Amino acid sequence: MQKSTAIANSNIAIIKYWGKRDERLILPTNNSISFTMDEQLSTTTTVEFDSALKQDEAILDGKIADEKEYERVSNFLNVVRARAKIKLFAKVVSNNTFPKAAGLASSASGFAALAAAASKAVGLDYSMKDISILARLGSGSATRSVYGGAVEWQKGSASDGNDSYAVQLSPASNWKHLRNIIAIVDAEKKKVSSRAGMAETVKTSKRFSSRLEAVGKRLEIVRSAIKDNNFESMADIIMEDSDDMHACMADTIPPIVYMDETSNKIKKAVRALNESEKIAAYTFDAGPNANIYTTNPNEVKSMLKEINGIKKIIECKIGEGIRFSEKHLFY
Ligand code: PMV
């Protein structure tokens, strides 16, 4: 069977996904919106289904996948096999441009690249929409990495998940002036996985239902700001949604706290920076690292230099969606 290689970039949400209505099919409780990042946060994956293999093989960043990683990859390949009606095992080789241990989400780019490469390798003639639906079964945030620029994951309402996929709101070329300045505060793996954490929030947080109501209004404002190419008019909403998600995490029993003292200092400094002109918006995922979207990267970077506890700063542009390559990672 043919070998296939796909490249996908990570994405950072500005209206967050935190909560599922279906755990198995990874169907979210609300729509989310993100920007796709540039090649600095990308995954390249080569897949080949091969009758000579006795089991799946997975090599991630040059190392044989550990038990947990192997299980996630192999379970995902089971879905691809079922769709293609084949029984062959596959070899998967995957490289990230960023260290997995940097505390950056690698599941979005990882499962988007795997969905694209595996579906092509097995001979499924998938559209980007089909790839988005397939990527969702690996990791929710991967649904959005299929497209570049600003992307919305529509939660859908069908019980089989076939209307829960991403659409592009605005191409990367409209966002040449925007950057995400990522401040790495902690490079450790997160203690509570997003999968486990959000399930507990849905079950126990009293605040969660009011979040769902508020998100509807925020989505409207952000969609219209994206249409107008106007970062300033969504900066406050981006921060509000991140704060709201972390408040729901803290309201979970037992409380989940991902942010630390340095994260909170960064929040305060971004607010101060915006006092004269709205140039930046912070957003935090399930970890303490800050993502600061900004139209003035130099000011944000000099502000960050004054804060202790930041290990590394990455300046990302808004990037493109999935692409295929003839340069395979093994032959
Ligand atoms: O799909 P996961 O497990 O990568 O969940 C991602 C959840 C957040 O990163 C916290 C928010 C989001 O919308 O990406």
Image (cartoon, rainbow, N blue to C red):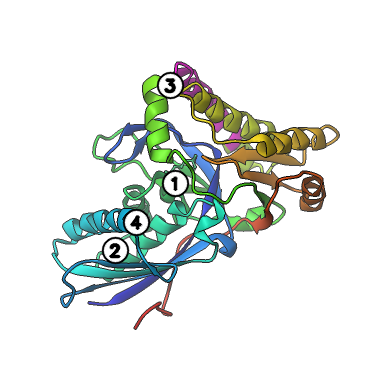
- In the rendered structure, which amino acid carries the disc numbered 2? Ser
Whole-number angstrom distance, CA of label 2 to CA of label 4: 19 Å
Whole-number angstrom distance, CA of label 3 to CA of label 4: 28 Å
Q: First in sequence: mark 1 or mark 4?
A: 4
Disc 1 residue: CB within 8 Å of ligand 1: yes
Name the residue beneath numbered marker 4.
69
- In the rendered structure, which amino acid carries the disc numbered 1? Ser
Whole-number angstrom distance, CA of label 3 to CA of label 1: 24 Å
Name the residue beneath numbered marker 2.
119
Image position, residue 3 (x, y; %)? 30, 76
Q: In this view of the protein, can residue 216 be seen by the observer?
A: no
- Give the left or right position of residue 201, taking residue 150 as reference: left
Crowding at dot 3, Cα within 10 Å, few <14 / some 14-19 / many 20+, comes out as: few
Provide the secondary structure element on which disc 3 rests: loop
Name the residue beneath numbered marker 1.
141
Q: First in sequence: mark 3 or mark 2?
A: 2
- In the rendered structure, which amino acid carries the disc numbered 4? Glu
What residue is rendered at 14% in x and 64% in y? 86
Front: mark 1 or 4: 4
Q: Are marks 1 and 4 in contact (CB under 8 Å)?
A: no
Tell me if residue 220 is in the magenta stretch.
yes
Q: First in sequence: mark 3 or mark 1?
A: 1
Q: Which residues are magenta?
A: 205-222
Tell me if residue 210 is in the magenta stretch.
yes
